[in-house]
Image (tube, grey):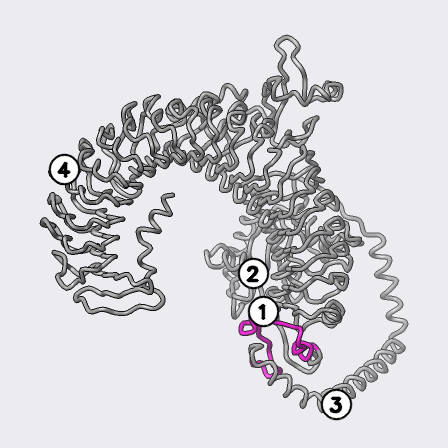
Amino acid sequence: MLLRVLSLFFGCLTLTQGKHVDIPCKPCVCRRTSSDKLVANCKDKHLSDIPKHIPNSVAYLFMSYNSIYHLPGGSFKRFSALEHLDLSFNQLKRLHVDTFTGATNLLHLNLNGNYLQLYESAYPVGVFRQQKKLLTLNIAKNTDVAHSVYPDQTLGDLTALQTLFIDGVQNASFGIGFSKLKNLTTLSLSGERGHCSVQTLLNTSFLHTPFVRNLDISKCRITFIEANTFWPLRHIHTLDMSDNQYLGFDRMGEALYGLRYSSLSVLKINRIVTTFAIGVHIKKNNTRYLSDLSLKEIHMDTNRVELIDQECLGHLKTVELIFMNHNRVTFGIYLLSLNKLTNLRTIYGYNQYSSNIPFNTVEAVTDTNLNPNPPLSSFDPHPIVRYSLETIHACERYEAECSNSHSYRKNHNNHQYDVRLDQTSIMNLPFKIPLPPNATYANFSNSKLNYDILELNFQTNKFKTIDLSHNVFSNWTGPIHECQTVEYLDLSENYCKYVSHTFFMFASGLKVLNISKNYLSVSLLDDTDGQIFANQTNLEVIRIAHNLIRELPPAIFRGLTRLEVLDLSWNMMTSWNIEIRHMLHLHTLDISGNRYEGIPTPLTKQIDHIMRNRNDTFHLSIKGNILKCDCPRLESLEWITRPYITFEDPGNTKCTLSDGESISFTDIEDVIAKLQLRCKIVIPILSIAVFGLLLFMLIFGVGMVYRYRWKLRYLYYTTRRKYRGYQRQGQEEDHFTYDAFVSYAETDRGFVIQDMRAVLERTYGLRLCIHDRDFMVGEAITANIINAIQSSRKTIAVLSPDFAKSSWCDYEVHMAKLESIHTGRNVLCVLWYSHIPDIRILSRDIQDMIEYDTYIKYPTQENDKEEFWTKVKAAISF
């Protein structure tokens, strides 16, 4: 309602669009709109009175941001057609009784931002006597005197008034004159739009405004509201008490008494506790009067709420929309009463912050001075929580099963159930986890939820959209039962490195899946049979960007027959072996930001197969790759020009010519024409040259093998015997097998083997893990790398130009950084061995360490080497 009023009031700003006729009325700008109404814009013209040259027929007059301090009687006498008048942000201190005489058709009046104190001298009785059609009046941001009194006799003349913006005075009470305003439906005292220092609302405050439907008392420094303050407001629809930080939930709950059995539908109580409140607990008494309402929406953002009594959810049975953003919600027994929210459709709970406040029983969490970081000795990792029979009734059906569970027991003396809870106990309950039965949307993104997602068994629900992005769900084991109705799922940015083959087993209704910005490359590569997405036959959009993917199994997407959009952007892919020809509805493929030098032929053939019976276009994005425009890629470049292929952002899609010049795809047709002419000569010559070179190398190789055949045979058996007899000696002194794992390029092997081993192992007695020496034979390289990092106290990156070019070194740095995130220890140590001309080719993590000078540089002087090795030893031992 408020937005509608504001749009009507300021809507004239858009009336000048379309056809209009300019009319001279200096110093203002006048024009007649297509609806034949005259608009006069005199805003910010340094005026001290109403210009005489404004036509009498003006309908919209804007006089804001001027220097008008006095409006004598008859100022608007000639403006009988005036509908909208804006006098905001002038210097008016009082109005004359005849100021608005003649403006009988005025609909909207804005006096915001002046100096019109709420006294009868500023608003003389009768000043609005002719404004019987006025719908909107804004006199907010005028009064900063807390003990003013509302001029109810003056305002009582506005019998058609629907919306009033006014400052909030101390102990605000609207006098008997307001009883004439039977059309007043929107009343705003908000400190957001003006001055408000109400502090206390009395039982008589709204006695004479019974028709108000939208009441805004936000940011009014309210600390107390008498119990029957809102009782006269029987027709109220929206109540906003937000930004009253000293009101609190206890006093807010008592204030709801007067709203019982009213028509309240929307309640806004955002930020009604202090900024640094601790242990905020919503108790059942705070919400008990909500059960007598037909509330549809409740907004309670930024209240640092941590716990909620389970009875509170029973008071919200009619609520359809809940906003709980920017709180600190923790696990509690109220989670087992979510099924009481039978009418809930949408819940917003994003930007939650983690809390370490312990609790032994839910009933005990009432102290607002709890220590947020208790000593470990006083923290019970499995606190006992007592469940009432009402909450735990579902467990009766499983009592035999429950009685055998170590986490559940029944107390027959007091008819209560004791359940030991930790952060994963919600996943191990002996019955289905309740959810709001009719909810369809939930957003808990960016909430620092740091758990492994194990097998979850929910009750039947109707959820369609779930956003859990930007958390720390690092392990997706599953499966998740009763999730077949979910159509949109966002699990992006969760630092996840593992997803099981059964995690999405029951999510058969998924249409949009976003798992971007994780570390799923290893898990997806292991899914050779395509089991992870096997049941997602209805999936239309899947996004797997930013996952460090080098390659995927051919059958990874075998079940996605209805897929329309596939996003594999910003990974590390260099080739294409994925099977997509069965995706007959696919129309968008994003492989931008990978390491392709050209569009792979297997991909182009599959796209041709998909498009053979279609008349639409296929959208392909390949920007950000290392594309080359040369003869070997000519065929793929020619494929681009096919009529059913559309390239996204061709201006930023670039390729490199053989001479090093970089060109965008906007000129690709000219480049193709030149390459076609050139490659007819170059390719045959190159083919002959390559064939001759291969033949020469074959002959040369056969000759060398024959000449040194006895020596080669000796070396083979010597090496075979040596490796068959090799065994590692595990001598652990502490938690780690090695003191440091060394990540280096092959060209720097001499430095690692000769210098580092000689000093760090032989002189200082440290244990180094060197892949040439210590990697387990038969294991995959990736597995060896991860085992080495996890078995070592530190990971030393030996920086050099070849290190920057090595994809394996890049992979080792990423894994070390991930190990730091999940263990909380500083793993990575940078040793700058040789000069790198351009550090921009390094990974972002290494660049940050160099930028903040957190690295050790190899000295050029022999005298400095002893100090260098001392620093390296200290960094490893730290």
Which mark is drawn over residue 648? Answer: 1
* Label 2 neighbour load within 10 Å: few <14, some 14-19, many 20+: some
Estimate the spatial distance between the alpha carbons at disc 4 and disc 2, rounded to whole Å.
74 Å
Q: Which residue is mark 3?
A: 685
Q: For marks 4 and 3, give the one nearer the viewer.
A: 4
Specify the segment rendered in magenta.
Answer: 636-662
- Assign a secondary structure to mark 3: helix
Q: For marks 4 and 2, give the one nearer the viewer.
A: 4
Q: For marks 1 and 2, give the one nearer the viewer.
A: 1
Confirm or deny contact between disc 4 and disc 3 (CB under 8 A): no
Q: Which residue is mark 2?
A: 843
Q: In terms of depth relative to the viewer, which is nearer, 230 or 801? A: 230
Percent across and percent down for residue 50 are 14, 57
Q: Quadrant of the N terminus?
A: top left
* Label 3 neighbour load within 10 Å: few <14, some 14-19, many 20+: few
Q: Residue at x 67, y 90 (%)?
A: 677
Q: For marks 3 and 2, give the one nearer the viewer.
A: 3
- Which badge, 3 or 1, comes first in the chain's sequence? 1
- Which badge, 4 or 3, comes first in the chain's sequence? 4
**In the image, what residue type sits under mark 3?**
Ile
- Assign a secondary structure to mark 4: loop
Q: Which residue is mark 4?
A: 125
